[in-house]
Structures are given as C-alpha cells and as structure tokens.
Image (spheres, rainbow, N blue to C red):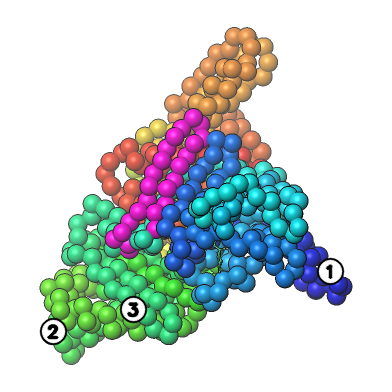
Amino acid sequence: MAKKNTYDAESISVLEGLEAVRKRPGMYIGSVSTKGLNHLIYEIVDNAVDEHLAGYCSEIHVTLEKDGSATIADNGRGVPVDMHAKGVPAERLVYTTLHAGGKFDDSAYKTSGGLHGVGSSVVNALSVYMDVEISRDGYIHHDRYEKGNPVVELVDGLLPKLGKTRKTGTKVNFLPDGTIFEKTRFKAEDVKSRMHETAYLNPELTIVFEDLRDGKKEKITYHEPEGIIGFIQDLNGKKEKIHEPVYFKGTADGIEVEVAFQYVNEFHENILGFCNNIYNSEGGMHLTGFKTTFTTVINQYARELGILKDKDANFTGADIRNGMTAIVSIKHPDPRFEGQTKTKLDNPDAAKATSKVTGDEIVRYFDRNLETLKKVIGCAEKAAKIRKTEEKAKTNLLTKQKYSFDSNGKLANCESRDASKCEIFIVEGDSAGGSAKTARDRMYQAILPIRGKILNVEKATIDKVLANAEIKTMINAFGCGFSEGYGNDFDISKLRYDKIIIMADADVDGAHISTLLLTLFYRFMKELIDEGHVYIAMPPLYKAMPKKGEEEYLYDDKALECYRKTHEGPFTLQRYKGLGEMDAEQLWETTLNPETRILKRVEIEDARMASAVTEMLMGTEVPPRREFIYENAAEAELDV
Ligand code: TSJ
C-alpha cells in the first residue's frame, strides 16, 4: 500500500489498516466462519501466552460470557499505559496498529504469535466493541473501542482510571461483529481443545476456561505440568503402547527444539509440529528436520545391530515412523509460514536446528536405552514387510482399476465437466440413491449410492481398502487418486467436484456411515477436508403440515420447538425416519436444491481434534461417533 506523504500520514495509515481488516477479514484471520471466529480468542490468548513466556504471567482466564462476548484476562505485567512518543498511551498503539506487538517487546524474541502474525488490533477491528482493563502501577486503567475506534476520552493524554489495585494484569472483553462473521457463537469444544493444547505446550501455565452461556456454569482448569509428554499420552489414549514416551530438548542456532514421541501398535504415523506454540497443520521444516534425522539414525543403528544386512536396502522414512506419535515443538525468533492455509513452517534454519538437536539427543537416548531402540526398529521391520507386500498389491490393483471405471454402473455422473460447479452426493442405500438420481440437477449433481457399511479403513490394510468396490468407485469418481503412508499419488487439482456431499440418515447407522466416509477421506484424501470440499447433507427431521398456511420442513428439534411456539392453530407433524421415506420431489426440495438445502462443511480445526477424530472414528463404541457427527451437525449452516 502506498503511504500518504503528509504530516499525519501515520494516523491515516493506522485507520486504513483497520479498515483493510474489516474489508478483507479473511486475509487476517483465515475465514469468517466459526473457525475464524474462534481465532479471535486464540489471538488474544496468544498475547497473554507471550507474557507468560516472557516470565511474568502464570494464569490466563478465558470466559465465554452470557451475552456472547469473550473475556480473556491474565496476571501479567499489564500492557504499558504510559504516554508514547506519538502522544497517545502505548496501549492505544497496541490495539490500533497492525502488528504493533513487537514494538513494545524488549525481549527481541517474540515467541508466540497468531495464525498469520495477526495482532490484537485485528480482533479489535472485527469487534462491535472491545473493552480493556489494565491493572498496573497501582491502578486499573480503562479503555474501550468500537469497531476498532477508541471511544474513551483521554485525561491529559492518559487513560482514565477505574480505581486502585495492588494486582497487575490485562483483561480484554470483546464482542465479535455479526456483520463480519457468518456466525458469532464461539464453539466451546474447539476453544477448550485449543486451551488444553496451549496448556500442554506451556507446562507452567494454568488456563481457566469458563462457559457461562445458556445458563451454564462450566469451569475447567487446564494445567499440564508434564508438558508435551502429557500431550503424547493424551493423544495415544488407550492405544497399545510399545514403550514409555521419550522426551528431549535442546537449542541450536538460537532455536529451541523440544520433542516427545511414543510408538503404538497402529499402522500409521501421527506427527504434530508446533512453532512458537502454534500448531502447524501443514507441517513444515521442523518436521522435515526431525524426520530426516530420525530416519538416518535408526538406519545406522539397524546396520550396527546387524538387523539390516549389507545387501538390504534402508528402511524408508515411512517404515520407521510406522506407529509413531510425536510432537515437535520449536521456538523460532522469526517464523515464516507458507502453504494453502499459511500453516506450514518455511524457515530452513528450523530444519537445521531440529535436525541437530534430534541427532544429538536420540543417539544419547538410544545408546542408553537399547530395549526401546530394538522395539522401534521392530516397528520399522514390520512396516517394511507390509510395504513390500502392499506395493505389489497396489500396482496390480491400480492397473485393474483403470479398466473398472467405465464398468462401474452405480455412479450417475453429472453432465458438466466444470469441476467448480459440480457436486457429488454419496448416498446411503439404494432406494434413497434411486430417488436422488431422479430428483437431482443432472447438469451439476452426480449421485453415488453406496450400500451398507463400507470398510473401516483404520483397521484395514491398503490392499483391502483398494479392493473395496465402493471405495474404488469413489477414488475413481473424485479423480485425484489417494495418498497413504508409502506414497503420495493424491492430486487435488484433478478433483472433479467442488463439493463432496455425504448424505446419510439422521440415525445411528447413518452416523456410522458418515464417520467411516470421513475416516476414509481423512486418511487417504486429507486435502479434501483441509480445503473444505467435504460436506454433510442435513435432511429434515420433520415436516409440519398446518391446517392453514404453508408446509414447513424442520431440520432439528430446536426448529420444531420454535415452530410449536410460533405457530398458531393445529398442524400435523410427519417425522422422517430416513431418506428412503422421501419421494424424489421432497428429496430435491429438502436436501439437493442448493437454494433450500442445509449443508454442514466438515472442518478439522487443530491437532488434538484431528487426532481425536481418527481416534473417535476408529474405536468400536457408537456413542462418541454420534457425538462427532451431531456436534458438527448442530452447527449446520445454510448454504446459499
Ligand atoms: F491481545 C491483547 F493485546 F489484547 C492482550 C494482551 C490481551 C491479554 C489478555 C493480555 C495481553 C498482555 C500483554 N498481557 N501481558 C502483556 N504484556 C505486555 O504487553 C507488556 C508488558 C510490559 C512490558 C514491559 O516491557 O514492561 C512489555 C510488554 C509487551
């Protein structure tokens, strides 16, 4: 942006800055969906975490207030309120200047930082109001903003005082702007999960979460003195562990590296990267450094121990990480991010530092813990064996697959080849599939009926997965292949549909099918989810037919309750038990027609959740699976 060359250019650019945030919020917080909304809280919390990392704050309170606002309070030093060179309190600059944080940070080491280095000023700009109380120097100082603009009059250039206090700390209360966000209800589960994650990454910090909405008084304290070791144990849950968690930490080139890992008896890896306490869902250089060195070291050991003979090829990286759960957390003074969602750590020195610390520390550890080393190598041997068998199976199946595409009669494809407009509905059951084929918009909507329960892909090996007819049809139909531990043949640019819509009954079986499909996508086509192509259709639960007036479809019990309250006169209520009960016209109106249907986009927010999803989807119990589906379903949004 060109800077205006006038005497007050500085103040103009400040306003322009916040205006820009309101104009293009997505640029600053990723999206204006619930995910972006929750990020407002994380952004503020990250500031308080910075204060903790600076050594001054031990507690952070996060409260979802009755009125829909959020309050974040810490017991740090309090944001400086003294007059700044520009004639306003320092605090004003923090909240009105984009990226002001660093200016007041004398530690030169800004260890925390939001999604895109977003500041509290962004939260301010996107809030109806933001109320700030700073306890410091014996007083509670007060400031308030509306849509980013200060509304409190200064007293001799300083903030007014609300009273005296012996404490110190910063308290911020804000209400997100409903004209900017699609929805303004924070999602408690996501916030809790993120706070728990933050507690694991900061073992000396206590985070108190409270949800006071809907007459609730939920209060949870997160304190995890075991740090990332505790995180690993939590991630691994009830899985069968191969050894005790291994932990190490070290510093190289001014970059602090902390790692914990533990192998479980499973067929995949789960390695999470964090930089300055922020989860990097797309991974990055720190993971590269860790993986490369881990592979090299284990291969060296395997040769020294005679497990790999001269003639044997090395284990692949994926062999070695088979069954591994790991957290790689680094602190970098100047992190750069790239990737689709700007969550991939891009600093080459992060790879170097992680590599160095990992090399030094795992050798030190394994030299002293041969039993663990042998178990780890055992996992790699097992994986290598399976890989070799599967490589054969895969080549066989893929060549066969090419021919099976046309002969697969079940897919009723759409006519358009414009992927940006096409949708594919995966429909449970042949009867619903039949109605859907009649009802659909043939130009843009494809229907793929699937029968019964598809394979549980978490439990099956890759050749079984690929041998499953329905899964094969899906892979073929989507057109982008699939990826798994041993190779990445997935190419999202070839995706033939903008929306992949799961259409299942609103009952336990339906939830089970949705869950299995999500697991399949998550494991073999994760980018479909990451890039927001996967949706769940929300067929109505009821149809209300009043004696007088228009019929109305009701999509959940809340809607029914509301209908009962607002509707006068008698009406009959039809309850839909399944998609099969609807005729083609009803199906079109309620579930297929983009003008009237309700879709839920499937989003996976953070590390714990991504892991919990596979966990949940994998287990054998039914209740948590339902929870996953319905919890998301409750957030259904109109797709217009
Ligand atoms: F996001 C935010 F800015 F709104 C915010 C900041 C919200 C919350 C809940 C806390 C904070 C915050 C900032 N807590 N603690 C601080 N610390 C400082 O800003 C601070 C204090 C003293 C000094 C110093 O050098 O004396 C330096 C800084 C950065």
Using the rendered view, name the quadrant where residue 256 is placed.
Answer: bottom left
Name which residue lies at 50% across and 44% down.
63
For the residue carrying disc 1, how many other residues have a C-alpha within 10 Å: few (<14), some (14-19), or many (20+)?
few
Percent x, y of residue 313: 24, 84
Q: Which of 445 and 228 is in front in this view?
A: 228
For the residue carrying disc 2, how many other residues have a C-alpha within 10 Å: few (<14), some (14-19), or many (20+)?
few
Asked if disc 3 is less than 8 Å from ligand 1, the answer is no
Task: Say which residue label 1 marks.
Answer: 8
For the residue carrying disc 3, how many other residues have a C-alpha within 10 Å: few (<14), some (14-19), or many (20+)?
some
Name which residue lies at 56% across and 55% down.
138
| Tag 2 secondary structure | loop
Q: In which quarter of the image is the C terminus?
A: top right
Residue range highlighted in magenta: 205-228
Gap in angstroms between the C-alphas marked 3 and 1: 47 Å
Task: Say which residue label 3 marks.
Answer: 250
Gap in angstroms between the C-alphas marked 2 and 3: 27 Å
Going by the numbered disc 3, the residue's amino acid type is: Gly
Percent x, y of residue 481: 45, 64
Percent x, y of residue 503: 48, 40
Name which residue lies at 84% across and 69% down.
8
Task: Say which residue label 2 marks.
Answer: 305
